[in-house]
Amino acid sequence: MSEIDLGLVNWSRAQFALTAMYHWMFVPLTLGLSFLCAFFETIYVKTGDEKWKQLTKFWMTLFGVNFAIGVATGIILEFEFGTNWSNYSWMVGDIFGAPLAVEGIVAFFLEATFFAVMFFGWERVSKGFHLFSTWMVAVGSNLSALWILVANGWMQHPVGMEFNPESVRFEMQNFWEVLFSPVAIAKFTHTTSAGFMIAAAFVIAVSSWFLLKRRHIQMATRSILVASVFGLFSFAYLGLTGDESAYSNAYTQPMKLAAYEGLFDGEHGADLVAFGILNPAVLPGSDEDPFLFSVKIPAMLSLLANRSADSFVPGINDLVYGNEAEGIVGVDEMMQRGRQARIDLAAFKDARGAGDDAAAEIALADFDLNRDFLGYGYLQTPEDAVPPVQMSFYAFHIMVFLAVFFGFISIAYLVYTTKGTIADKRWLLPLGIASFFLAMLASQAGWIVAEVGRQPWAIQSMLPVGVATSNIGAGNVIVTFWMFAGLFTLLLLAEIKIMLRVISKGPEGA
Amino acid sequence: MSSLFVKVYRFYRDGFAAMTVGRTLWKIIFIKLFIMFAVLKLFFFPDFLSTRFDSDEQRSQYVLEQITREP
């Protein structure tokens, strides 16, 4: 690995992060707006009120703009797998192949078939079939997200597989274990609920702008009513799935949990940091106070992490240096076992190359003793197992704070819309517009928590990011990084321009 | 059976013909796909292992070499 410099690894990381974050600007709106369109159309079919139909068409047009601009942006990630992350790509091909193939088939048949009916089928198919198609687009879009999130969940918590040294691949042993892994389920439900919240915020934002301009008052009010109810349910769902996600982190990725909570020294009855400013000088193993300022909720972290208020939650120092009293093995010991696994794997390779089957078999048996620690064998120091704490901590707290903010916005909009006074609440409407951008920010912060928080691992405990990279020149990655930055920025600008044009025309232009 | 195909054909033909915003969107989609597949994939994103090796055995050997190399 000495030939792979950190510049390459970090540029490859940055490129993947850039494309994933841009991709994730388009996806959540598709996930949530598809359901909102289905709700709007259901009301139209139930009431027969043409105004609801016009409203549905308006939001459907915006959904179509977002879908068209965002479609295929995820394919770039697959290009990057093959070029920048070839070791990783080779090793996980057997696990990812099935979920991504299913995604392709589901996306193609469900979306391509029903998408056309949804947009071309008004007045040409029955109301019932059109509505069915709209619902199928919503279900299909969200099912597409399932498979990629299952793959991501597997990287965070690799189950249902076995590493085969012969093929140098993680091979699937149990598809259902991969699909129904608690981490994959939490990943899917939490991510899609974020999409629902963003879409509700989008509808509230655009409708608030109409109300501020005193245009399309009835359409805006009706849209807000549905979106605020959906937003409120999404907020509750987001909270429940977020809790499940953190709970699964506690036993599958305790280091990530410790990082985003800024917990350096584990404790029984650990407090939850509601708000805090981390001490920039604090490092693993140092005696510095981790916080310059903090507001904590007593014992709440223990309760959320282990469902027991006086339970022990390990901190970064416990996980790095070990804690005998709590039965936690330090990274140093795992590094030794990981290095032994690498040595045995190298011996297996050499024996196989020499055609010495007996020696290969012995090396393989030795490798089996330490195979679960393989990834730790690539770390240079125990502290390498710690993700960027500051980034994880602030991203997590920004995400939670903004999600709670949106919860309050949904309640306020629902109350005033029900009272029929929402159009008069001029102070609230700009907050409603801002809520969409803040919800987007919260969602991006969520991905930072998920992906930065699991560093240094590409596959938890098995494969560090540095080993997953291709041995290519950093210059290539830098060039394509800026190309992507340019391409995606152009796409985003195109989306904003077209959306603004559609919005300014209003429902009559849909 | 053929009338079904005709109906489906007309459905799509009329749908595409009646598009307004959709025309712009399709142009963007085609330009985007062209850039992605005809430029990026072809010139900047070759599959590292597929272009360097002819067989899966060689690829697995290479990856094994990479992950067992001394740090």
Image (cartoon, rainbow, N blue to C red):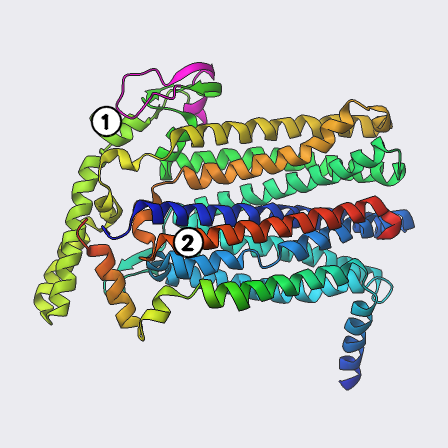
| Residue A297 is one of the magenta-drawn residues | yes
Residue at 23% across, 27% down: A323
| Along the line of sight, the residue nearer the viewer: A443 or A11 | A11
Q: Chain ID for label 2?
A: A
Where does the image place residue A372, in percent across and percent down from the top left? 25, 48
For the residues bearing labels 1 and 2, Cβ distance under 8 angstroms: no
Tell me the quarter of the picture where residue A385 sits. top left
- Residue wearing tag 2: A477
| Residue A62 is one of the magenta-drawn residues | no
For label 1, the crowd category at 10 Å Cα-Cα, with few meaning under 14, some 14 to 19 and many 20 or more, is some
Q: In the rendering, which numbered label is found on residue A323?
A: 1
Amino acid type at mark 2:
Val
| Along the line of sight, the residue nearer the viewer: A197 or A207 | A207
Q: Is mark 1 on a helix, strand or loop?
A: loop
A140 left or right of A49 in image: left
Q: Which label's residue is closer to the chain start, 1 or 2?
A: 1
Where does the image place residue A186, in percent across and percent down from the top left? 49, 42
Q: Is mark 2 on a helix, strand or loop?
A: helix
Q: Which stretch is magenta?
A: A279-304
Residue A123 appearing in the image: yes
